[in-house]
Image: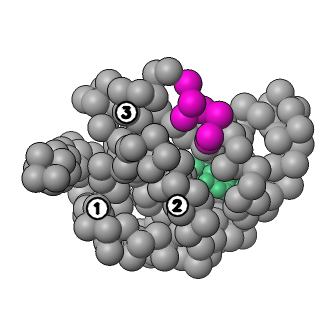
């Protein structure tokens, strides 16, 4: 299956992603992780991305799209993938659709992990990460609301969006996600 997981910072994507990976047995394509590795190794992409990441802003589309294309071309992605943190802008989504279409493929489904903003802020105060200081965290929420939230409509129009209530126990949330996967599968069979 080719699945995208979308959610604002602090929505619990990490936890749910891990469970989904265990279930689906597909590669995990996390652009945040790719970028953090690139920064650590001081590759040209990492050097270019660092300043944006430190401010909680999105890195330029061209930079991240190049990295994702290279990753999608590896053989393990033929059985599917779980995209985590990508796409995050409409141009990234359009590029992904084009890329898959050229290989006669498409995204099977998009899972939105929905959590109210007040709850995100509450959770943030309980976490510690270099890009989680209050100002940077709020930049990341603004980036999500302004640049990533429009993707939800984009995928809703394609009838691929499943909005999952991200409040409650991790197990319950995961059960909701699993139920939505069955719908993606059903769509696949109807096509
Ligand atoms: P994440 O771990 O997914 O929250 O990503 C950490 C940081 O990497 C983000 O705050 C952005 O600066 C950058 N980043 C990750 N994925 C993308 C993307 N698809 N487009 C632009 N920037 C990204």
Tell me what residue is drawn at x 48 percent, y 56 percent. Answer: 97
Residue placed under numbered mark 2 in the picture: 93
* Magenta stretch: dominant secondary structure: helix
Image color mode: one colour
Q: Nearer the viewer, residue 190 or 42?
A: 190
Tell me what residue is drawn at x 44 percent, y 60 percent. Answer: 7
Question: Residue 148, percent across and down?
Answer: 53, 69
Q: Quadrant of residue 36?
A: top right
User: Which residues, given as a range, are shown in magenta?
Assistant: 68-74
For residue 80, which numbered disc appears in the image? 3
Q: Is residue 171 above or below residue 95?
A: above
Distance in Å between CA atoms under marks 1 and 3 = 16 Å
- N-term-proximal mark, 1 vs 2: 2
Visible in this render: residue 146? yes
Q: Is mark 3 within 8 Å of ligand 1?
A: no
Residue placed under numbered mark 1 in the picture: 160
Distance in Å between CA atoms under marks 3 and 2 = 17 Å
């Amino acid at each position: 299956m080719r699945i995208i997981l979308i959610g604002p910072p602090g929505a619990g994507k990490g936890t749910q992603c891990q469970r989904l990976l265990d279930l689906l047995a597909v590669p995990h394509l996390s652009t945040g992780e790719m970028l953090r590795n690139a920064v650590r190794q001081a590759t040209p992409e990492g050097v270019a991305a660092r300043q944006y990441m430190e401010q909680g802003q999105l890195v330029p589309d061209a930079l991240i799209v190049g990295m994702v294309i290279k990753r999608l071309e590896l053989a393990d992605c033929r059985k599917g993938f779980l995209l985590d943190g990508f796409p995050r802008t409409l141009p990234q989504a359009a590029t992904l659709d084009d890329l898959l279409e050229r290989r006669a493929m498409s995204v099977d489904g998009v899972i939105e992990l929905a959590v109210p903003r007040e709850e995100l802020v509450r959770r943030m105060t309980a976490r510690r990460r270099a890009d989680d200081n209050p100002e940077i965290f709020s930049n990341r929420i603004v980036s999500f609301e302004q640049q990533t939230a429009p993707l939800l409509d984009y995928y809703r129009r394609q009838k691929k969006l499943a909005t999952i209530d991200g409040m409650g126990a991790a197990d319950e949330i995961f059960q909701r996600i699993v139920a939505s996967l069955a719908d993606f599968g059903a769509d696949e069979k109807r096509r």
